[in-house]
Amino acid sequence: MQSEATVAMATPIPTDTFNLGFIGAGKMAESIAKGVVMSGVLPASRIRTAVYDDDSRGEVFSSFGVKLFDTNKEVVEDSNVIIFSVKPQVVKDVVLQLKPVLSKKKLLVSIAAGTNLSELQEWAGHGRFIRVMPNTPAAVGEAASVMSLGKTATKEDGELVATLFGAIGKIWTADEKLFDAITGLSGSGPAYIFLAIDAMADGGVAAGLPRDLALGLASQTVLGAASMAIKTGKHPGQLKDDVASPGGTTIAGIHELEKGGFRGILMNAIVAAAKRGRELSQN
Ligand SMILES: NC(=O)C1=CN([C@@H]2O[C@H](COP(=O)(O)OP(=O)(O)OC[C@H]3O[C@@H](n4cnc5c(N)ncnc54)[C@H](O)[C@@H]3O)[C@@H](O)[C@H]2O)C=CC1
Ligand SMILES: O=C(O)[C@@H]1CCC=N1
């Protein structure tokens, strides 16, 4: 069966004529901005944002060279691509307030969960909009992002966004109807894995390991397992079988996980997060 998502193509960015603006200087904007700068695809001097209600956010961005403006309007006016990175509950007001300066010359991007392209396009007054669902591992160049193009976003616009988000991890294109499920899986997913790392480290401590060693082993084990799943292309069930010796330690651990409903719990978490995304889009 053909996948509904495809890995997107990237294109070089003309850095001397290009500025990237963030509306909403929060955690996700910080992860993307840091990842973009670290990748070398765009220098920090080409990134702009404005601080809304918390000066410490400005310090975070200026500490790595991002240019700070006093208002969102100035950010838009000085940027070619604008990423709306405010919470879903405020994105409508923010886009509507900026509508007079959101000309079709600006490529608009939204990363807000549960906010549909049809609404974003209506609020902005044009369809040169791209919806992206990234995740916080962007900050270390390991994001999983998905994009969907708005009505009048061009192939070149898609390639530009693929370059930006491809520089901070992997990016796929997918039909917008998949976005709530994507949000539940990869958007929210890092939090589930951080819980797992924390819990695995606790288990190590409970079994007698010092905390630092337990946390290091738990984190590296998750990284190594993810890397194996990607690089070998083997089914995770096969990789699991390769770890579990007959009558050994692993199968004893897996037995406990299965008794606790580990897989069902993870599936439920993703379905619940996807449902919440759908609810947000209906508000
Ligand atoms: N945190 C995550 O892992 C991910 C978040 N997202 C999406 O990214 C968006 C931002 O999320 P976070 O960065 O986690 O939230 P956040 O709360 O850290 O950032 C939002 C920022 O927007 C600022 N803000 C509020 N009203 C504003 C206004 N009128 N003008 C300018 N700035 C304003 C706030 O002061 C805050 O700094 C949300 O829509 C979320 O759905 C998407 C993928 C992953
Ligand atoms: O929790 C949230 O609503 C956002 C969207 C995906 C990750 N964080």
Image (cartoon, rainbow, N blue to C red):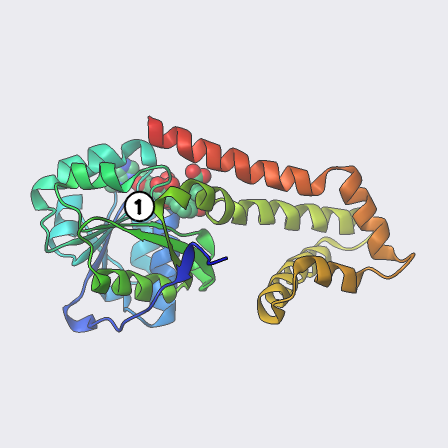
Outermost residue toward the right in this view: 247
Quadrant containing ligand 1: top left
- Quadrant location of residue 8? bottom left
- Quadrant location of residue 26? top left
On screen, 58 above or below 17? above
| Callout 1 secondary element | loop
Look at the image and tell me in which quarter the C terminus lies. top left
Q: Of 212 and 276, which appears nearest the observer?
A: 276
Q: Amino acid at mark 1?
A: Ser
Q: Which residue is mark 1?
A: 85
User: In the image, 271: left or right of 5?
Assistant: right
Q: Is residue 39 visible?
A: yes
On screen, 267 above or below 168? above
Outermost residue toward the front in this view: 1
Q: Of 187 and 127, which appears nearest the observer?
A: 127
Q: Position of residue 229 (x, y in %)?
A: 62, 64
Callout 1: CB less than 8 Å from ligand 1: yes
- Quadrant location of residue 261? top right
Q: Residue at x 34, y 27 (%)?
A: 282
Q: Position of residue 12 (x, y in %)?
A: 26, 73
